[in-house]
Image (tube, coloured by chain):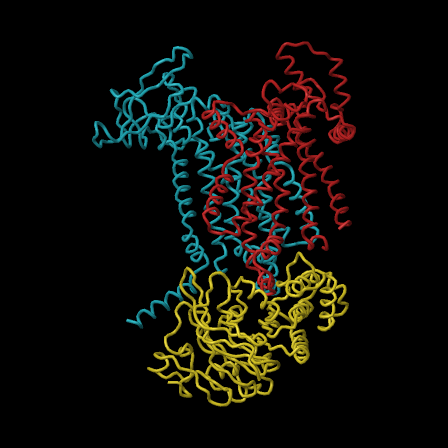
Chain colours: A yellow, B cyan, C red
Amino acid sequence: MRKVLEVRNLRTHFELVEGTVRAVDGVSFQLNEGEVLGIVGESGCGKSVTAQSIMRILPKSARIVDGEILFWNQQDVVDLTKLDSEGEQMRNIRGKDIAMIFQEPAACFAPVYTVGEQMIEAILLHEDMSKQEARRLALKMLEKVKIPNPESVLDRYSFQLSGGMLQRCMIAMALSLNPKVLIADEPTTALDVTIQAQIIYLVNQLQKEYSSAIMWITHDMGVIAQISDRVAVMYLGQIVETAPVKDLFRNPLHPYTRALLRSIPRLARRKKKLEAIKGVVPDPYNLPIGCRYHNRCDSFIQGLCDEREPTEVEVDVAHRVKCFLYGGR
Amino acid sequence: MAINERVTKRTKVEEIYLASEWKLMWWRFKKNKLAIVGLVVLFVLYVLGIFCEFFAPYNPEKIYSAYVYAPPQKVHFFKDGKLTRPFVYGFKIERDPQTLRRIYKEDPSKVYPIKFFVRGDEYKFWGMWKTNLHFFGVERGTMFLLGTDRMGRDVLSRVLYGARISTTIGLVGVFLSMMLGILIGGVSGYYGGWVDNFVQRSIEFIRSIPTIPLWMALAAALPRYWSQVKVYFGITVILSLVGWTGLARVVRSKFLALKEEDYVVAARLAGASEFRVIFKHMLPALTSHLIASVTLAIPGMILGETGLSFLGLGLRSPAISWGVLLQEAQNIRTVALYPWLLSPAFFVIVTVLCFSFVGDGLRDAADPYKT
Amino acid sequence: MLTYLLRRLLFAIPLLFLIAVVSFIIIELPPGDYLTVYVMNLKQSGEAIDEAALQVLRTRYGLDKPLLLRFFIWFRGVLKGDFGYSFMWEKPVSQLIGPRLWYTVLISVLATAFAWVFGFLIGVYSGIHQYSIGDYAFTVLGYIGLATPNFLLALILLWAVYVTFGVSLGGLFSPEYANAPWSWAKFVDLLKHIWLPVIVIGTGSMAGLIRILRANLLDEIEKPYVIAAKARGLPSKELYWKYPLRVAVIPFASTAGWVLPEIVSGAVVTGIVLNLPTVGVILVDALKSQDMYLAGSLVMFLSIFTIIGTVISDILLAWLDPRIRFE
């Protein structure tokens, strides 16, 4: 398996009037060719900021303060953090080599241009072809994502289409240039459950055909189970556990992962009360000292967890966890 | 110590969670410096207007025929290089040999110290208590800090009396507009359908008529023999005939949004009467927005009255408002010779500016739960 | 689009009729009919009263008939181009308002263009350069522009020009051209005078437009579709022009249509202060002397003008915003 993307010790901070928010604080992971990496965590844990850091489309107040984002493009390796975010090289990667789909499909298409205009624009930005050719490609892609009557959809505006349809259009647009990496930032969250299942099925199918590596961001453990090969669990700007998807569900190690899994309702265990994780996510301006999770953890060790930060340990093959329970001192 | 710090941090966070909506609004509003400045200035202006008899150094109708078109007298703090109680110099009057116009010069031999709480022109405070106490003034000579007009009346006193009418006409007018706006906008937003359609079209129609000509035409129809008070209320009614449309739009769009809110639906499903749903559940939720919109609507009213009175179609002398006072400044040659006649304009602009600052501050603070 | 256009135009017809109704109400509003006022004025000045002429006017405008009938007599006249009789000028209204109305329209259109163009340019600048010195300067100017009524701005500008240059800039023409026939020199003279009222009338609306465009642009810049377009690889320069501005210009355009009533209001008041040959002066005089046919007709024409303006702006809006076109 060859790496396409590797993030090393990424730190992205927001400088706000109220203080500094360390939204991503030392995140490392890698993405291999053709695999689906699920990134899961509560809202505000830094999942989306990680994605935006890779795409270099962070808001003005955010800055990458440390770390590397390595991207294997054919033979060369580029560190995306070193590129000018507005420069030509980054722009060529963005959308062509690394494409992204977003949470609210309806809001991601501008209301004043047709869906087709926006798809064709995306193609023409990166490919040297005529408008007709671009339109033909867009049409072909819409057929690929199983949109009925694609010709008419191209000339529709976003407000005339349903969320599920638009998300298909967005996937078509993202895949039209055959990207090496597809970043999906909660693409099914805003959709109905049935549509959600259709989209996941569609992406699974297309992934076989296009062999793009996918980074799938979600807060939904159920979605993770359906789509990913490997999973990274994030909590407050850090990855606390990485594991192949089966290992993670069978043998969750980090107390946070366990708590997350316990909070999923299951039909089989009907009698048991559904558990919620105690406490609230701490104030982002004042992150806890020591392990970030210690104030909500069941296995909290006084004098250790609230004083030092655990390091990552490899417990099993490709199963890494950041917790004192498994060493890491 | 670290623990202590953490505890205080936590209580601070908790304080934010526990604070009422109004407290949150106030915290947000406080952050806006311009809005605070505006609020303070408005407070001062309203106090001056409400107690204008006391703050004005002279009776606004008192004619000093010896001092027609006298320029503002400067307040001096130094005499012979030494700091003293503030004072003004008296006038030395000469005549221009060609135009025969009076020329006023400072006469250093006449020194009139300014004193606080002096006895001066007699007046009836709020038309009830007879007194002659004034906030400040001179005991001998004259003190025209903003000069005098064509009849030799003190402009400062007239501006302060004008503040009473000009600042309150906005409040009264906006109150009427608010009543109409809530009623019509609320009905339109709550019932929707053809009612909403009808109200919206009517609002569009009213707004497409140029305001000032319409106001002018309506104001001109107020009977001449009406008393000052009647004309005052007549003008406020005319101003609010157009003013309500803006507020009705705000109320309507908020009502449309609120109607879909779960808690409103829940209240309706629980069998609450329409009256109760509207007044108990929906109105409180838009109070803050309403206050902001109302504040932003006041300047339009003040400007409307000023414009109408300036054209001679609104309040008429002997009523004193800033617009009435500005009538004196209609002729550009007069303004060039006696620029202090424009001083009411300064007060109009400051008042309107302050209302915009406060209104903008309120609008930004109106939704405290939005990040 | 065509159906929208037709619907919008059809919708304007009842509006125009309503305008006529409002104008008639204005005409009827003062107590007593005009002839009584007219006769009273004549008596006061001691002039002879021509009973026969009065009778002609009375039957022509149906003054002895009931209200509703009077309205229809008047409305039929309006459709034929007879707007009533001005007792102050002793002339039919239709002969009085022509050129004045056109000057008002000319100045209003120019002021609207001024407000749109500069409002747009400054609004875009302020939105893209948020919190820059230029942005702050325009914000301060905008606040003052909104707070200063037109007539005060006109007075202050006139005064400033008079004091510094010693010239009075009132009027639309220098005295030597005022009654001269049209010529190139007269046109140049017009240009020399017209900029002042245009700026005075346009400034207030411009300030409002700047605020709206700036606020909307700032809102739109943060919208997901902008980030999505950026993620497609669109360079940020194109990004601003192509996406957020394109959307932010919609509320700008919808407000821009509604500044016309405001601008016409401004043109009326400013016309009085600047002594322009617009409808301002005769409207005030007509209202003061209760010459109601003249006053009512003027209000009617100004309203018709703004209605036409809002129709044009609505069509423009539909062209800009597909959401309206496909409603």
Relative horizontal placement of residue B123, taking residue B253 as reference (left or right)? left
Image point 53% across, 39% down: which residue?
A: B300
Q: Is residue A159 visible?
A: no
Is residue A132 or residue A309 the one in the foreground? Answer: A132
Q: Is residue B371 above or below residue B89?
A: below
Please state if A71 lies on the left or on the right of C316 as rendered: left
Whole-percent x, y for residue C236 in the image: 56, 58
Residue B258 location, x and y as percent?
58, 58
Residue at the far front in the pictured view: A75
Measured as percent of width and height from the top left, residue B341 is found at 44, 26
Which quadrant of the figure contains the N terminus of chain A? bottom right
The residue sitting at the bottom extreme is: A316
Does C46 sit above or below residue A117? above
Placement of C62 over or under C123, stated as above or below? above
Q: Quadrant of the C terminus of chain A?
A: bottom left
Q: Can you say whether C11 is above or below A4 in the image?
A: above
Count of numbered tags: 0
In depth, the one of C102 and B125 nearer the eye is: C102
Q: In the image, residue C290 lies at what x, y percent? A: 63, 23
Depth check, front residue: A271 or A257: A257
Q: Which quadrant of the view contains residue A191?
A: bottom right
Residue A208 in sight in this render: yes
The quarter holding residue B74 reads top left
Residue C86 location, quadrant: top right
